[in-house]
Amino acid sequence: MNEYYKDRYQKFSEETNLMSNKSLSQMSKEEMDSNLRAFMSHLFGADVFSSKALTAEQKQQLVHSMMIFVFAHRHNKGDRFIVET
Protein backbone atom coordinates (compact mmCIF):
# COMPACT_ATOMS: atom_id res chain seq x y z
CA MET A 1 0.00 0.00 0.00
CA ASN A 2 2.88 2.38 0.73
CA GLU A 3 4.17 2.01 -2.82
CA TYR A 4 0.73 2.68 -4.28
CA TYR A 5 0.30 6.00 -2.46
CA LYS A 6 3.95 6.93 -2.94
CA ASP A 7 3.62 6.46 -6.72
CA ARG A 8 0.28 8.29 -6.89
CA TYR A 9 1.67 11.21 -4.85
CA GLN A 10 4.77 11.42 -7.03
CA LYS A 11 2.67 11.55 -10.22
CA PHE A 12 0.30 14.11 -8.70
CA SER A 13 3.22 16.21 -7.51
CA GLU A 14 4.80 16.21 -10.97
CA GLU A 15 1.52 16.98 -12.75
CA THR A 16 0.64 19.88 -10.46
CA ASN A 17 4.18 21.14 -9.78
CA LEU A 18 3.28 20.75 -6.12
CA MET A 19 6.83 20.69 -4.82
CA SER A 20 7.94 23.71 -6.89
CA ASN A 21 11.54 22.46 -6.87
CA LYS A 22 11.78 22.60 -3.08
CA SER A 23 13.85 20.03 -1.24
CA LEU A 24 11.81 17.57 0.80
CA SER A 25 14.30 17.81 3.65
CA GLN A 26 13.62 21.57 4.02
CA MET A 27 9.83 21.51 3.67
CA SER A 28 7.90 22.56 6.79
CA LYS A 29 5.08 20.56 8.31
CA GLU A 30 2.56 23.24 7.28
CA GLU A 31 3.72 23.10 3.65
CA MET A 32 3.60 19.32 3.60
CA ASP A 33 0.17 19.23 5.26
CA SER A 34 -1.10 21.57 2.55
CA ASN A 35 0.41 19.42 -0.20
CA LEU A 36 -1.03 16.23 1.27
CA ARG A 37 -4.47 17.83 1.67
CA ALA A 38 -4.41 18.82 -2.02
CA PHE A 39 -3.34 15.29 -2.97
CA MET A 40 -6.01 13.66 -0.82
CA SER A 41 -8.71 15.99 -2.13
CA HIS A 42 -7.68 15.05 -5.66
CA LEU A 43 -7.58 11.34 -4.84
CA PHE A 44 -10.67 11.00 -2.63
CA GLY A 45 -12.72 14.04 -3.61
CA ALA A 46 -13.01 17.54 -2.21
CA ASP A 47 -15.54 16.53 0.46
CA VAL A 48 -12.95 14.60 2.44
CA PHE A 49 -11.93 17.82 4.20
CA SER A 50 -15.14 19.81 3.86
CA SER A 51 -17.35 17.17 5.47
CA LYS A 52 -18.74 17.94 8.91
CA ALA A 53 -18.78 14.20 9.65
CA LEU A 54 -15.14 14.39 10.74
CA THR A 55 -13.68 16.64 13.40
CA ALA A 56 -10.64 18.83 12.68
CA GLU A 57 -8.56 16.40 14.74
CA GLN A 58 -9.76 13.43 12.67
CA LYS A 59 -8.99 15.27 9.43
CA GLN A 60 -5.48 16.02 10.69
CA GLN A 61 -5.06 12.35 11.60
CA LEU A 62 -5.95 11.47 7.99
CA VAL A 63 -3.18 13.80 6.78
CA HIS A 64 -0.69 12.25 9.21
CA SER A 65 -1.69 8.74 8.12
CA MET A 66 -1.19 9.65 4.46
CA MET A 67 2.19 11.14 5.35
CA ILE A 68 3.18 7.79 6.82
CA PHE A 69 2.08 5.95 3.67
CA VAL A 70 3.70 8.33 1.21
CA PHE A 71 6.96 8.97 3.05
CA ALA A 72 7.58 5.73 4.97
CA HIS A 73 10.81 5.28 3.02
CA ARG A 74 12.14 8.60 4.42
CA HIS A 75 11.72 7.77 8.11
CA ASN A 76 15.44 8.13 8.86
CA LYS A 77 16.28 11.10 6.61
CA GLY A 78 15.63 13.82 9.20
CA ASP A 79 13.18 15.68 6.96
CA ARG A 80 11.91 18.87 8.56
CA PHE A 81 8.21 18.04 8.09
CA ILE A 82 8.68 14.62 9.72
CA VAL A 83 10.67 16.02 12.64
CA GLU A 84 8.03 18.74 13.18
CA THR A 85 5.21 16.19 13.16
Image (cartoon, helix red, strand yellow):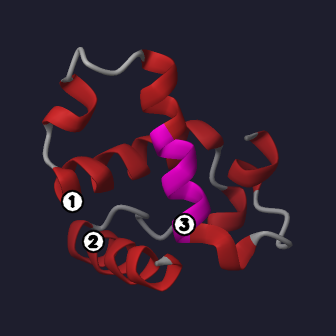
Query: In the picture, which quadrant includes the C terminus?
Result: top right
Q: Percent x, y for residue 54?
A: 34, 21
Nearer to us in this view, 19 or 63:
63
Mark 3 Cα-neighbour bin, 10 Å: few <14, some 14–19, many ≥20: some
* Element on which disc 2 rests: helix
Sequence order check, earlier mark of 3 and 2? 2
Q: How many marks?
A: 3
Q: What residue does disc 1 label?
A: 43
The answer for how far apart the CA atoms under marks 3 and 2 are is 15 Å
The answer for how far apart the CA atoms under marks 1 and 2 are is 9 Å
Quadrant assignment, res 9 = bottom left
Instruction: Give the residue drawn at x 20%, y 52%.
Output: 44
Q: What residue does disc 3 label?
A: 69
The answer for how far apart the CA atoms under marks 3 and 1 are is 14 Å
Q: Please state the extent of the stretch shown in magenta in the rendering.
A: 62-70
Instruction: Give the residue drawn at x 81%, y 49%.
Output: 83
Quadrant assignment, res 30 = top right
Q: Percent x, y for residue 57?
A: 52, 20
Magenta run includes residue 31: no
Mark 1 Cα-neighbour bin, 10 Å: few <14, some 14–19, many ≥20: some
Q: Would residue 78 be found to the left or right of residue 67 on screen?
A: right
Q: What residue does disc 2 label?
A: 12
**Circle 3: residue type:** Phe
Sequence order check, earlier mark of 1 and 2? 2
Instruction: Give the residue drawn at x 48%, y 43%.
Output: 63
Q: Percent x, y for residue 26?
A: 70, 58
